[in-house]
Image (tube, rainbow, N blue to C red):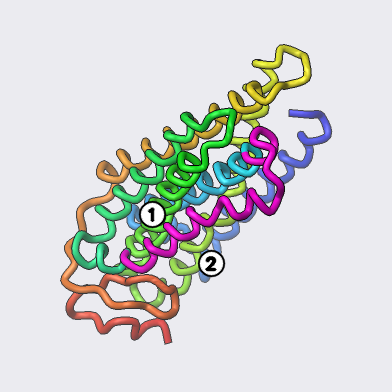
Amino acid sequence: MNAPEKPIRSGGLVLLAAFLLVERRHSEPLVPLSVLNRPSVKWPGLFGVITFGMCAGTTVLLSLYMQDVLGFTALQAGLSYLGEGAAATLGGMYVAKLLVRFGGVKVLGAGLAIQGVGTVAMFALPVHADLAALLITSSVMGLGHVFSVVSFITVMTTGVTGEDQGVVGGLSQLPQYVAAIGVSGLSAIAAARTNALASGAAPSRADILGGLHAGMVTAGVVVLAGALFVGAVLRKRTTAWAVPCPAYGTARRHRPRRPPCSHRR
């Protein structure tokens, strides 16, 4: 940590501690800490941070791979993301049906596993252009990411009382903003590995690729660990039926006695 950064980080921690103290003592807190501590809220939120953070960080590394290693132009690099985008679109079309059939917890675990496999497989990306490998690995990652995002929001917001629905709905959007941690963390790992391989000299394309591989594999391992963790911390939920929820653009699961989407008016 650089000297100028210490006061900033210390000040941030103090402000965070003050916020939590005020929230704990206030009769009507902005974010009730009791809600944050619910297993059905905190664990899906953690998995949301994992899927968003590792996907966002890997996407940045892929951009560096295409431009700094393969020599792609910005336009070529952008077009190379079409596979990932197409897979994400396809996943969005079918994830609601999967949620109805298997439930949010199983789809979440499967989504993280798919994302993790696609990310770890990027270790095979070569120093010379291999469009098939690039499209396949990024598409698998994108497909798993969409499954993970929709399912963690579904698990997080299912069974919440009407008075807490707004708070939990807002918290379900928080992981995508916290995902910046993944971008900075994976970038730091890639840079450190690149510098180690270069040994003080100007890094070659192979050195840069080695650093990017380190970041990609790290991201994949973190996501796969999250997939294994899902079954351990989230109890299996019973789902009778699911309906599309326009407010979130996802499939929401409801218990039979609760009318669908009535609390989001």
Q: Toward the viewer: 226 or 217?
A: 217
Q: Which residue is mark 2?
A: 29
Instruction: Give the percent coordinates (x, y) of residue 70.
Output: 64, 36
- Mark 2 lies on a secondary structure that is loop
Instruction: Give the percent coordinates (x, y) of residue 218.
Output: 49, 31
On the picture, is 170 further left or further right than 163? right
In magenta segment, residue 79: yes
How many angstroms separate mark 1 from mark 2 (CA)?
A: 30 Å
Q: Toward the viewer: 119 or 69?
A: 69
- Mark 1 lies on a secondary structure that is helix
Write the residue at 61% across / 48% down: 180
Write the residue at 30% across / 48% down: 109
- Tell me: residue 127, above or below residue 170: above
Amino acid beneath label 1: Ser
Q: Which residue is mark 1?
A: 148
Image quarter hosting the N terminus: top right
Write the residue at 47% across / 58% down: 33
Image quarter hosting the C terminus: bottom left
Q: Earlier in the sequence, mark 1 or mark 2?
A: 2
| Magenta residue span | 66-94
Residue 41: image quadrant is bottom left
Instruction: Give the percent coordinates (x, y) of residue 163.
Output: 40, 76
The dot on residue 112 is none
